[in-house]
Amino acid sequence: MKLTTYRTEGCLRGTRKPVRWLLVALCAVSVSSARAWGAEGHRLIAELAQKQLTLSATAEVDRLLGLEPGATMVSVSTWADEKRAPATAPLHYVNPPEGACDYDRQRDCRDGRCVVEAITAKVAILKSRASDAERLAALKWVIHLVGDVHQPLHVGLAHDKGGNLYQVRAFGRGSNLHAVWDSAMLKRLPYSAELVASAAAAVPAVSVRSDPAAWASESCALSRSADFYPEDRKVDAAYLARWDATLVRQLARAGMRLAATLNEALGSAPAARDKK
Ligand code: ADE
Ligand code: ZN
Ligand code: ZN
């Protein structure tokens, strides 16, 4: 990734220790444009994951990305949003019903068209003997969707479209809670021009097994916890202070788990993988 634009003002000033490492990581991410988990979130997750890949997973990721001139994990991380179409829109989220965060395929994703089943399906393609072109497309999906499933409101409620219909005033502007979690909060965190430190070491140990259903259940519980929806519909410094550590933790987990998923899918040499 070319590091072109940085925000240096206010870097790390006044931040709490647990979030500092990620703020450092944020510095390495170009801040030129914004889309959902905004582009910044997806790029950051891809960058964190890339640094945690095994040698053999790196070799296979690089070989597949090499089919597209200039492609990197960071550059392809937003591809699935850029080409978002009505047919694939449901693959970015899942909406378990009220009072039920234990993901249940029969109940929550009967047709298989939701973020949990999409991750599972794309990982299966990545592990398979499908063509390189198909496996490259699957890789791009996995890089993106493991990020999405860690955005708490991508495992939100159907009635408000995962917070898209919950209007809020965010830092003085009209917005909605989904957009706040996709990007507005992340943009508010201070950036630094320093490069990524070894981020994962500072994150409390979590299960990094590739288990999209468990990740979705976690996100679901977060977006339904007390105070997640601000009753006064105000997203301000106080809301950010309450939730910034959660935001940072979700990004960190997404990076670690994306790496674990790719290491598991691509960790063995191609010949061994083909025999599976
Ligand atoms: N984007 C569009 N609809 C959505 C939903 N129901 N949940 C989460 N994200 C969405
Ligand atoms: Zn989103
Ligand atoms: Zn998405």
Image (cartoon, helix red, strand yellow):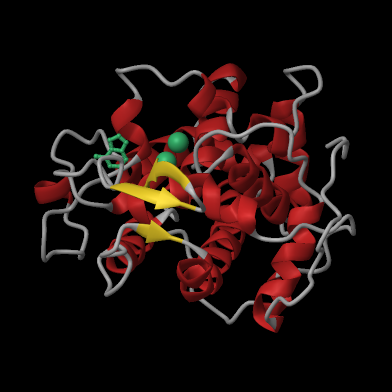
Quarter of the rendered structure image containing ligand 2: top left
Q: Residue at x 37, y 37 (%)?
A: 92
Query: Is 181 positioned to the left or the right of 27 in the image?
Result: left
Query: In front: 134, or 105?
Result: 105
Total labels drawn:
0
Residue 98 location in percent, x, y?
11, 59
Q: Quadrant of residue 111?
A: top left
For this orientation, the residue located farthest to the front is 172
Q: Residue at x 49, y 50 (%)?
A: 172
Query: In front: 104, or 135?
Result: 104
Q: Quadrant of residue 220?
A: bottom left
Q: Residue at x 45, y 68 (%)?
A: 239
Task: Indicate whether 150 appears above or below 57.
Answer: below
Task: Indicate whether 112 appears above or below 108.
Answer: above
Residue 43 location in percent, x, y?
67, 43
Residue 196 location in percent, x, y?
83, 60
Task: Indicate whether 141 appears above or below 253.
Answer: above
Name the image quarter holding the N terminus.
top right
Residue 276: tell me if it is visible.
yes
Query: Is 61 positioned to the left or the right of 36 in the image?
Result: right
Query: Is 220 positioned to the left or the right of 256 in the image?
Result: left
Q: Residue at x 69, y 70 (%)?
A: 200
Residue 271 location in percent, x, y?
65, 38
Query: In front: 190, or 276?
Result: 190
Q: Quadrant of residue 197?
A: bottom right
